[in-house]
Amino acid sequence: MDLLNTLVEKGLRRELPTREEALAVLATTDEELLDVVAAAGKVRRQWFGRRVKLNYLVNLKSGLCPEDCSYCSQRLGSKAEILKYTWLKPDEASKAAAAGVAGGAKRVCLVASGRGPTDRDVDRVSETIAAIKEQNEGVEVCACLGLLSDGQAERLRDAGADAYNHNLNTSEATYGAITKTHTYADRVDTVQKAHAAGLSACSGLIAGMGESDGDLVDVVFSLRELDPDSVPVNFLIPFEGTPLAKEWNLTPQRCLRILAMTRFVCPDVEVRLAGGREVHLRSMQPLALHLVNSIFLGDYLTSEGQAGQADLDMIADAGFEVEGAGETTLPAHRADLAEAAAAGGCGSHASGGGCGSHASDGGCGSHEASGGGCGPCGGAAAAAPGAAPAARDAEQPRPDLVAVRRRGAGTDLAPNA
């Protein structure tokens, strides 16, 4: 396909595809799917080889959130049966983190429900960061605490945080239909605060909330402009007790197209396969490794993930390798920028315009996990008239195939232990 050849060439040069090209990826047929995966895989291997970075979530504070995000089981008024608890003590969080590091995770993501941290909350998280880094030499720590106030990103950086995650989740045009208690602009502002403080910015999306192809392309283009180091792609887990409980819009094929489109638009960033992969990709998860270079190991915030050993076996069986603690995740041109930003802050990021050094080549920029919740893709295309029954079934969402497993509900299970 001329389209795929063009996208590969642009990806190898870090050039931005056109909006029409990105939309065309989402519109490809099932017959073309393996060609799409192979093409995006060339771009992934150019910048990341066959390495897969492992990340591990530690849920510091669960439930009891005053925000009304429709996709979230921790939202205001949620009737979802989930674990609810207030702040973990630093030693408890450090023990949970150690389990992930022992399994091969090189980054620990510290997540807390809520609109955003108070200054006292920042103190708590700072103590937790210190405890984790003392017990786990060389581990990266990413904080995901919601909307940041002035000065809080700098305090987290000074405490030892390496990154900050806050997702855009969906397009600006549709954001108001998902959340009313804060705005899309609030989220953009927090990502920019992380950039300006010299933290590695992590920001991504949630697919499967009823959005259009145009919405998906818009949010990924917005992420490229914000220039995060990592872009987590979450697939909605429709929790009972939330407004989106019946939004089963995804097929494995649809998920792979979304991941491929994200890779073409953001060729040299850490694209992370995040929440919902087990539910929606199912047996096609190994194909996704040709598109992403990062996954979460173990459980998510309020749902169970695949067993850690199953993840490690999947990576090895697919011909990939776990990224070592001493290896640099980002390509050299981005890693250098990230180091410069950590040392003094990259001023051009504060305005959200991307890192100036990329302006001449259209590159994605430089900076990285999940915003308002690190965790948990559009509608399925209609089958062509006369298609075989098996083809039609493959292209229809199948919620009957899976059961959303609520992590530890009704038990004393330690968070993500």
Image (cartoon, rainbow, N blue to C red):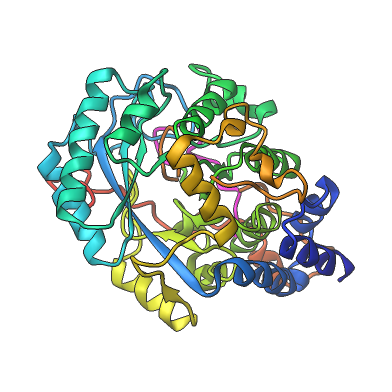
331 to the left or right of 301: right
Question: In this orientation, does residue 391 appear?
Answer: yes
Q: Is residue 75 left or right of residue 17?
A: left
How many marks are shown on the rendered structure?
A: 0
Q: Residue at x 27, y 48 (%)?
A: 407
The residue at the point 28 percent across, 55 percent down is: 139
Query: On screen, 167 above or below 391?
Result: above
Which region is colored magenta?
A: 239-251
Q: At 33% across and 60% down in the image, what residue appears?
A: 106
Q: Nearer the viewer, residue 109 or 59?
A: 109
Task: Report the magenta stretch's main SS.
Answer: loop
Q: Position of residue 323 (x, y in %)?
A: 40, 69
206 and 262: which one is in front?
A: 262
Outermost residue, right direction? 2
Percent from the top left, x then y, of residue 307? 30, 66
**Residue 249 painted magenta:** yes
| Spot occupied by residue 281 in the image (x, y as percentages of width and height) | 52, 63
